[in-house]
Amino acid sequence: MSTVVLLTFTGLGLGALYFLVASGLSLIFGLMDVLNFAHGALLSVGAYGTWWAASGHLPGAGPAGAGFAFAVVFGTAVGTVAAVLLELAVIRPLYTRPREQILATVGVGLAVPALLSAIWGSDARPFPGPKALSGTFGLLGAEVPLNRIVLIGAALVVLTALKLFLGRTRHGLVVRAGVEDRAMVTALGIDVRKAFTLVFAIGGAAAALGGALGGLYFGSVDPEQGTSLLIFAFVVVVTGGMGSLTGAALASVAVGLVQQFANYYTTAGLGDLAVVVLLAALLLVRPRGLTGRLA
Amino acid sequence: MTPTPAPLLTVRDLRVVIGGRHILHGVDLEVAASGTTALLGRNGAGKTTTVRGILGLVPRTGSVLLAGEETVRLTTYALVRKGIGYAPEDRGVFAALTVAENLRLAERPGAGEPAYDLVYELFPELKLRARQAAGTLSGGQQQMVAIARTLLNGNRLIIADEPTKGLAPKVVTEVAQVLERAAEAVPVLLVEQNLAVVRRLARHCVVLADGRTAHRGPAADLLADAEAARRLLGVGSTGRPTAGAPVRTAARPAARTTEADA
């Protein structure tokens, strides 16, 4: 029983991490038809930004208490700025050339980890986190690490905030309409490109937050973390239905849990394979993903 | 003959190439400063592409003057903000959004109070269905949403692309009534296949054939001339396709003769 509880929370924690990456990826694809292969790099930027700040390089930030919260805010902000720059400098000039656009994001996705390892080395660096979050709590006989709860909580907050943004604000309305029919949005007199930048900023912030909190989950940061998470985030996005936030949330939970349980109860590594097989099976039955959305 | 006021919209030599295919070879048209101007032509003549070209929804060259101001280099949203309401051929209703959200999206912040009173007076049904997803509406109701969006903003020009297409006869009448009333206040450019609707609404008409302007003139004159209507539109003036309607080549010489007087 205790194993099942532990695996469940670990799977949900991993799912939360996937959701933080996949939510932005899904909105970006849904609205802009852009497959952002650089999204993992945004996670890495957030992770390294937080790590750098929490390691004592940023006045006021540190590994404990409010200092750590400040480090997370800093890392998220750096990731957000990186996302906006990526949209303005790389994605926007290539809107009419989707093939080059994909190549450019792949390039950024490769260049950022290379840059990170050139500056800080390719080895994993221990991630300084508050002692309070490195502990465990007992539940039904299992010792569940607290950082799982932090990740799950952060994902729920982001999900709620995104739902409110999409459902209650005019910008959110523009994004939802743009996912359906971008040209018609412009034909109503709305500059949809502003929504593009906004969605990139939001997606970048969520991914960078995922990077910051992923440091707690993994206990370290390394340049390739974002890239390996991106693959599963893509699995989540396709499973959930392109452009669907609820779909991404459901698929994140499913992928995280399947992966953990399969890795534990079968051979390690089979869980990673299992989610890809599941995705293939799902696409055969429901080509539009869980929510039936295909942007 | 009284001098006619300057047209609201003047299009000159509008050309559209999509994927290497020349769709429009130089369309010329005017939208009169009042009343309804009908844009007619057979299927594939380039009516919808002309409208999309005017709005910049497809890459285009030529000249599009809105009240004398050149707009061909403007992006679609910037042009629309100058006061154009557009109801596209497929209605362009956002299916996953509610009726109220579809209307709210068409509001233009900073362009005055949206005219919800007018919209709900013309379409009381939309008020009742405000919270319903637009995708679950009937075709006629979706068309009402599309037209309502053009009426919210005190636009200077309304462009309606086949607003009666695929609608039941009773709904066609309703839509025509609303457009008739709208045209009392705002000039309308109407793409329409239903000649009964054209006869009822349009004062002027422009006929396209093979991506060019083939005829311009008063709508009533064209509709009164059964032979010209058959030649240009491929239909009898009753609005029904005639048996063995001549193919496009027949429209070409007509284009030259009728264009001279435009």
Image: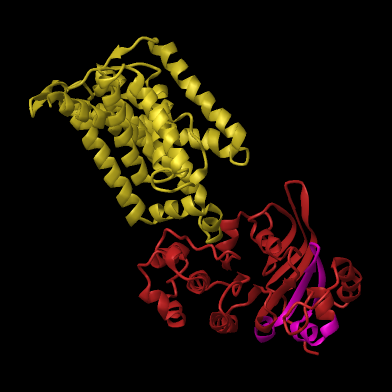
Chain colours: A yellow, B red
Q: Can you say which quadrant of the picture contains the C terminus of chain B?
A: bottom right
Identify the residue at horizontal 47%, vertical 71% (top origin). Answer: B138
Magenta region includes residue B204: yes
Task: Name the foreground residue: A19 vs B80.
Answer: A19
Q: Position of residue A284 (x, y in %)?
A: 47, 39
Identify the residue at horizontal 66%, vertical 60% (top origin). Answer: B52
From this view, report whether residue A185 is shown above or below residue A137: below
From this view, report whether residue B51 is shown above or below residue A7: below
Q: Can you say which quadrant of the picture contains the N terminus of chain B?
A: bottom right
Residue A42 visible to the viewer: no
Q: Residue at the bottom extreme? A: B1
Identify the residue at horizontal 66%, vertical 79% (top origin). Answer: B36
Q: Position of residue A141 (x, y in %)?
A: 7, 25
Number of on-image labels: 0
Residue B74 visible to the viewer: yes
| Quarter-of-image position of residue A206 | top left
B216 sits to left or right of A164: right
Task: Name the foreground residue: B38 vs B10.
Answer: B38
Q: Position of residue B133 (x, y in %)?
A: 40, 64
Identify the residue at horizontal 55%, vertical 39% (top origin). Answer: A92
* Magenta-highlighted residues: B198-227
B7 sits to left or right of B212: left
Magenta region includes residue B33: no
Q: Position of residue B173 (x, y in %)?
A: 57, 84
| Quarter-of-image position of residue A60 | top left
Task: Name the foreground residue: B183 vs B166.
Answer: B166
